[in-house]
Image (cartoon, grey):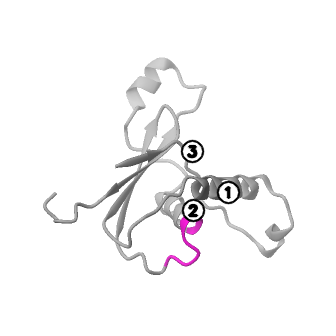
Amino acid sequence: MTAYNITPLGKPRQTRADKWKKRPEVLRYRAFCDEVRLNNITLPASGYHVIFVLPMPPSWSRKKRAEYDGKPHQQRPDKDNLEKALLDAIFGEDSHIWDGRVSKVWGQTGQIIIREACPCACC
């Protein structure tokens, strides 16, 4: 299991104009991709489990934070957009990825946790 202190971000919809326009959501996405590449994150072609830990809003009370810590995150961004952003940041072409699991939970700070399957398939 490997944990990276990177706040997960879903991949935004982009247009041709985003090549030169400086929309804030696209700039955040590009910064996220740069951070993933700087941390040399890798994924196998199959058998991985990525857990996206999304940070709780600062406006939440301590009681609510304690209640939601580690619980499933059932809001936007969608898990498939989070996975798409991560795979596109790691690989130029990700068509060789054929099996993987993705979860998203609440946490105090943003993290990306990667668990690889046991090679003996006993676990």
Q: Which residue is mark 2?
A: 85
Residue at coordinates 54% horizontally, 51% vertically from top-left? Answer: 76
Circle 3 crowding by C-alpha within 10 Å: few under 14, some 14–19, many from 20: some
Residue at point 44% right, 19% down? 63
Quadrant (top left, top right, bottom left, bottom right) of the C terminus: bottom left
| Residue 93 lies in the magenta-colored region | yes
The local secondary structure at tag 3 comes to: loop
Q: Are marks 3 and 2 in contact (CB under 8 Å)?
A: no
- Range of magenta residues: 88-94
For the residue pair 66 and 9, the one nearer the viewer reads as 9
Please provide percent x and percent y for residue 109: 52, 35
**What amino acid does circle 1 point to?**
Tyr
- Which residue type carries mark 3? Thr
Task: Establish if 94 lies above or below 100.
Answer: below
Left or right: 91 in relation to 123: right
SS class of the residue under badge 2?
A: helix
Residue at 83% of width from left, 71% of height from top? 17
Is 64 one of the magenta-colored residues?
A: no
Tally of numbered tags = 3
**Residue at coordinates 58% horizontally, 55% vertically from top-left?**
36
Q: Position of residue 7 (x, y in %)?
A: 57, 44
Pointer 2: residues within 10 angstroms few (<14), some, or many (20+)? many
Q: Give how far across and how far down residue 58 sits, in percent.
A: 60, 27
Residue holding disc 3: 7
Label placed on residue 29: 1
Side (left or right) of 13 relative to 117: right
- Please, what is the three-letter code of the amino acid marked with disc 2? Ala
**Relative depth, front residue between 96 and 108:** 96
What is the CA distance from the residue labelled 3 to the residue labelled 1?
11 Å
Q: Secondary structure at mark 1?
A: helix
- N-term-proximal mark, 3 vs 2: 3
